[in-house]
């Protein structure tokens, strides 16, 4: 209450209503060690309803994480570790960024799936070195979001029985009572997708304890505890109303609430000594568990040295030595989606934490690892995930597994990257090196038509901060893209591939391939260049053809391939100026929107309208994405 | 089968498996008149699983819509009316574009809600002039998508009992059997959200008829018929397998399938005369119903002339005379979200089909119409919709209601436009003039922090073809944006508003406001301009402040406001060259990504990273979106 009041901004309602259940969880079963927030086998706690951040910060402070009182007092201020919504990387003990509703619970599904996968892969009889739970507090808003419904369904299918969601059922939403728009039978709905459903009075500590205890008993699926709570509990005039959701109580009501709760009005931010002692005692259990785990890891290492070394490597977030030895293989003209499949298989041998799959398009995206089993409840260590037609949950689950140290990939058609865009953005914000593969990347997919043909997607992905977007021109640039994506530690990657065959145009794949710099001169002009043709992906070979014509006409022409703008733009200015010398005009060629290309070119060959249904060659012809049109455009530019 | 084979591309499995149920529906209860595909009181039929387009085209052809055999033979070819996935506007009888899974069923929810709203508003005792059903064929892929789950939940809450979904339950998905990822108890799940659930053997015509009959009996909610079908029915070697989902049968299997189904192998595309006669007889019922409706409309017009005139106007898609009379009211410095609320209320008086609401953020977006009831099952003519925290379904439902002739709006924070992006794109593709209002449009929202602060969203919306994106600088530009959005007939609009107060900088609102041209000279330079400051929204006033400094330093400076790029770019070249004269350098100012701005400027003040949690003024200062930084940037540019 004091935090929100001091900030004059924030959400007191959830913290006040969910305090009891959060307290019982944190001082009860939750297994974390505040002195080592990154301890690998800790329980994961996700406040999916991230607007209740004051609750989380209060818990972290009381539990002894490195979050001093001054940070609570600087809630929502510039430079504080207590932003309006939780952000991992900024605040110790915060597992992920939450706030966009539905993302937290869905990402938690990924964390629980990672835990089970690691346990299946690494635990040995007598050595349960991976054994923890994932706890979530979710709100009605979370449950209304489609991404959450997708993830809940998949979690049930996967029988993730160490995932426990506490549903803060307070019957209040921003615009009023939840029954304005949300009248589901929540119990029945969870049961229909394979969850165990428990109930408790969320304001009654003993009832919460009982439910938490039951939630830890064996089950055939994940558990949701429907906790009936009162939003803004303790506020005599605002509890159980929408008014307490997202605005400070106000000085008078704050005093009255403290009176009702039996807290002195002053000083603000009071934490009494016995509270600190109570939390310290609870957290000591977590520290003991962590110490015990370290001892058990030593025993494990003695008994299973190779497994232990692999697990420790995964925990450190490192790639194995020689992981890329098979990656840079000879390639032939082919669709980059096929080349992508081979590149992934080449890496999968050593990078055992690489997990393939797709949103029900594995045959098309080519992102299922060859010879690997589908990850299922009956095969929890499988290395391909059938996400179903659930692109958004796939994005969140990939993020959750990646935050947990694995390298799963998400894959679908590029057009459907729109369906998981909020999760892609969150990956960037969370510094989470998630892997996404998007095939069928332009009108080149042909007959499926404009509902399936990306036009604006590649550029729109480039707009997202801290996200590397690769559109390789051939199999070698594809290998480079996979290499770059795998080596990222804090940046997610999207690798965009074609349905159609592309000729091989770039040098043989290696760590010295010039595409490693994001953009490079692929074909040099016969003399000082009079024009530059800059292209990506399937249009690079069109640029190469156009160059031949222009050179034949006596126009010295350079071709630049620009597979990854973000990496190119991180190069030093002198390199960039070598590639794009001052004063040399450029033509961009990309089978998508031209908006954005003015950064690199003064004339454009592209597509600023929806596509059409027809064979691909016909479409490139009709929309003028041809060497002839490039030549014409270049001529007009330099005239 | 012949269509897919001739195209050598497409999806035979669904058409073959769903043919029985589709035939029973189309020759049974479906009420359409092929001679008047736009007849207003027709039943709506949505093939949500749009990849089964060959089925829909076959039905339209047999029913006598203007879709000759040549079009079927040109399936998926350039210039045909039979694209790979259905597109409204292109093919008579196609109600909407489907293919991106989940959109069809969700948009259909909007159509059903529109029907009920119109009935509630216009029907009078003895005059049921709006009275039709909405029928959907949906696949497992549709039901897995989050957008569909959101819409299904809201449809149940709204008790839309004239909506009937036929679920093509064929147990096969692209990657194999559905139980790889989808093991929900579908019946229980639909029941949990208030639907009536029926079952039938989808391959048994009589069973389908019985289910269709029962689906038309009174119910307390929408109806789903779970139709057990066999994908690729009739194909001896491919039926009931994923192989028949998305690839032609092949010549041999095609012959064998025809043998099994008792169809002659040759000629291809055979339609026997009795089949035509059978369909003609069925469709005659629809034509009779349409004729009857026209007579009833005349009686209605005689009894209720004003209501009839309004309904006829809505059917024609026209605005009422004088609809904008109250729109251009005097405004004061305020947040554009507040000005937006007033503008909507000013229009709502005459435009009775304007329907407000939001995704549980009405208090923040200010898009609930004042004094109007919430649209609920108990209040089906209410003029505000509580969508719940379901942005994606909101987008689809707005599209569905708009396609049905109403003008509902969707609203949420700009950051969450990402959640409904696939529906925004589809609105553009469908030429559907949907209205979207996105508030809290930048770091100007302050303390909620980077999870809630749009950076790339405004530019990413500009990338979508056929979508007008407005970011008004003040209350008058906001009025212009609302005017422009309301008058669109084939283009959707996004109007982007601020949380924070903006000064009034532009001329008084009117149809002659220069912002009507999308971009204009807001402040002229004291002499021939040496630099142009081009900005949108909250940064226009920053540009105006910077201009004063630059002019004081002796730099003649022009300020251009560019609230709608799409409309500006549709102006003639001479006007655009007046605004941006050749050779005058420009600085762009927008509190978002600079990628894209190179189209108009050579130097940029913007934000190419995630925001932060702090009061808004502090953020503008820290991120350098200030008059001082604009002046500095302009100086460096013209040096």
Image: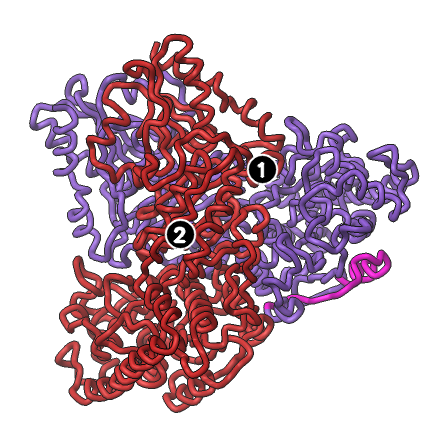
Chain colours: A red, B purple
Quarter of the picture holding the N terminus of chain B:
top right
Q: Position of residue A564 (x, y in %)?
A: 35, 38
Quarter of the picture holding the C terminus of chain B:
top left
Q: What is the number of the mark on residue A52?
A: none
User: Disc 2 designates what residue?
Assistant: A424
* B207 inside magenta stretch: yes
The subunit letter for the residue under badge 1 reads B
Secondary structure of residue under mark 1: loop
The relative height of residue A527 versus residue B184 in the rendered view (above or below) is above
Q: Residue at x 53, y 36 (%)?
A: A334
Q: Label 1: how many residues lie within 10 Å, few (<14), some (14-19) or many (20+)?
A: some
Q: Residue at x 30, y 16 (%)?
A: A529
Q: Which residues are magenta?
A: B193-215
Say if residue B29 shows up in the picture. Answer: no
B578, A381: nearer the viewer: A381
Q: Residue at x 38, y 72 (%)?
A: A241
Say if residue A213 shows up in the picture. Answer: yes
Q: Position of residue A247 (x, y in %)?
A: 29, 66
Calculate the distance from the C-alpha at mark 1 to the C-alpha at mark 2.
38 Å
The subunit letter for the residue under badge 2 reads A
Looking at the rendered structure, whether the residues under marks 1 and 2 are on a common chain is answered as no
């Amino acid at each position: 209450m004091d935090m929100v009041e001091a900030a004059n901004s924030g959400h007191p309602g959830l913290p006040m209503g969910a305090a009891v259940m959060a307290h019982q969880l944190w001082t009860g079963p939750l297994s974390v060690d505040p002195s080592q927030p990154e301890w690998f086998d800790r329980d994961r706690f996700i406040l999916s309803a991230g607007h209740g951040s004051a609750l989380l910060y209060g818990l972290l402070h009381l539990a002894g994480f490195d979050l001093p009182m001054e940070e609570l007092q600087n809630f929502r201020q510039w430079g504080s570790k207590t932003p309006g919504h939780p952000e991992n990387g900024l605040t110790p003990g915060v597992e992920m960024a939450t706030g966009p509703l539905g993302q937290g619970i869905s990402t938690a599904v990924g964390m629980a799936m990672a835990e089970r996968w690691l346990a299946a892969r690494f635990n040995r009889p007598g050595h349960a070195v991976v054994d923890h739970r994932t706890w979530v507090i979710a709100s009605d808003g979370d449950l209304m979001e489609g991404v959450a419904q997708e993830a809940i369904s998949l979690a049930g299918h996967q029988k993730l029985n160490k995932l426990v969601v506490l549903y803060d059922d307070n019957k209040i939403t921003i615009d009023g009572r939840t029954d304005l728009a949300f009248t589901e039978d929540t119990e029945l709905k969870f049961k229909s997708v394979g969850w165990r459903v428990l109930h408790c009075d969320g304001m009654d500590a003993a009832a919460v304890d009982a439910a938490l205890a039951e939630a830890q008993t064996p089950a055939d699926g994940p558990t949701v505890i429907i906790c009936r709570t009162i939003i803004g509990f303790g506020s005599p005039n605002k509890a159980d109303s929408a008014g307490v959701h997202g605005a400070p109580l106000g000085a008078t009501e704050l005093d009255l609430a403290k009176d009702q709760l039996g807290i002195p009005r002053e000083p603000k931010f009071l934490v009494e000594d016995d509270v600190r002692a109570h939390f310290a005692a609870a957290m000591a259990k977590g520290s003991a568990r962590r110490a015990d785990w370290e001892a058990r890891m030593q025993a494990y290492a003695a008994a299973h040295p190779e497994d232990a070394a692999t697990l420790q490597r995964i925990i450190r977030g490192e790639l194995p030595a020689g992981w890329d030895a098979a990656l840079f293989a000879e390639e032939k003209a082919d669709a980059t989606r096929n080349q992508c499949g081979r590149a992934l298989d080449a890496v999968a041998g050593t990078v055992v934490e690489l997990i393939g799959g797709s949103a029900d398009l594995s045959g098309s995206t080519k992102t299922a690892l060859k010879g690997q089993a589908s990850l299922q409840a009956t095969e929890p260590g499988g290395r391909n995930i059938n996400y179903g037609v659930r692109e958004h949950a796939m994005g969140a689950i990939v993020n959750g597994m990646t935050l947990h140290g694995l390298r799963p990939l998400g894959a679908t058609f590029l057009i459907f990257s729109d369906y998981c865009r909020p999760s892609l953005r969150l990956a960037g914000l969370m510094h989470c090196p998630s892997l996404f593969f998007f095939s069928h990347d332009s009108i080149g997919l042909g007959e499926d038509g404009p509902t399936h043909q990306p036009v604006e997607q590649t550029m729109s992905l480039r707009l997202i901060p801290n996200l590397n977007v690769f559109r390789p021109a051939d199999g070698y640039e594809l290998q480079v893209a996979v290499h770059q994506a795998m080596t990222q530690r804090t940046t997610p990657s999207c690798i965009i591939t074609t349905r159609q065959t592309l000729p091989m145009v770039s040098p043989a794949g290696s760590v010295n391939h010039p595409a490693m710099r994001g953009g490079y001169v692929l074909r040099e002009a016969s003399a000082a260049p009079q024009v530059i043709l800059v292209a990506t992906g399937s249009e690079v070979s069109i640029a190469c053809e156009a160059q031949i014509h222009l050179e034949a006409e006596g126009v010295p022409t350079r071709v630049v391939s620009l597979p990854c703008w973000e990496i190119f733009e991180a190069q030093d200015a002198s390199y960039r100026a070598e590639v794009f010398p001052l004063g040399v005009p450029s033509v961009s060629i990309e089978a998508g929107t031209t908006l954005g290309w003015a950064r690199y070119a003064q004339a454009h060959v592209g597509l600023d309208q929806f596509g059409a249904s027809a064979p691909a060659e016909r479409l490139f012809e009709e929309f003028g994405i041809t060497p002839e049109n490039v030549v014409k455009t270049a001529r007009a530019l330099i005239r």
